[in-house]
Amino acid sequence: MSKTSFNNCLNCNTKNQLPFKFCSNCGQKNTDGKITFSELWSEFQDSVLNIESRSWQTFKDLFIPGKLTLEYFSGKHRKYVHPLRLLLVTSVLFILAMSFQDVQSSTNHTYDIKERISKNYERQRLYRILGNITDSTNLVLGVSYGGLFVLFLIGTIFITLFLL
């Protein structure tokens, strides 16, 4: 932020001696409010790339299971990024990352939603038919799967006895 030559602080209106870089009352920097790209870049580096920043501390502790939750619930809020802000930022980053990935190129065939729905419908129809067949077989025979196994054993014994 570029320096100006105001006598009064723009934040608290306290008179200061010229030239002053920071207000002696509130501590605000003496600027005209215009932000240059170099100042924006330095603020970015200070807040994001700083090893001691909240975002790096949160990112580091995120990979230790349960630590971030326990620290937050124990009252250590200032040390970490707010949970909702973290959720929002990671969601946006995930959506951006997924938008760069081509879903069709990761598989060997093209993805047709209508074809997938019709195949799924046919599969469910076959499962219903097979389920009805097994239900009706159980009703006719009056046995369960264990009973079917016993009938199978009796049938094989009967066939072996009469064929030999």
Image (cartoon, rainbow, N blue to C red):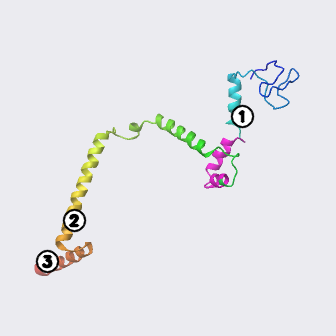
Q: Position of residue 100 (x, y in %)?
A: 47, 34
Taking 135 as reference, is 20 above or below it?
Answer: above
- Quadrant assignment for the N terminus: top right
Considering depth in this image, is 75 or 11 the residue closer to the camera?
A: 11
Dots 1, 3 in contact, CB < 8 A:
no
Q: Residue at x 65, y 47 (%)?
A: 60
Question: Residue 70 lies in what quarter of the image?
Answer: bottom right
Residue type highlighted by circle 3: Ile
Q: Which residue is mark 3?
A: 159
Q: Which residue is mark 1?
A: 46
Q: Position of residue 99 (x, y in %)?
A: 47, 35
Q: Is residue 148 magenta?
A: no
**Nearer the N terminus, badge 1 or badge 3?**
1
Q: Position of residue 27 (x, y in %)?
A: 81, 31
Camera-side mark, 2 or 3: 2
Q: Residues within 10 Å of mark 3 (few under 14, many from 20)?
A: few
Q: Which residue is mark 2?
A: 134
Residue type highlighted by circle 1: Asp
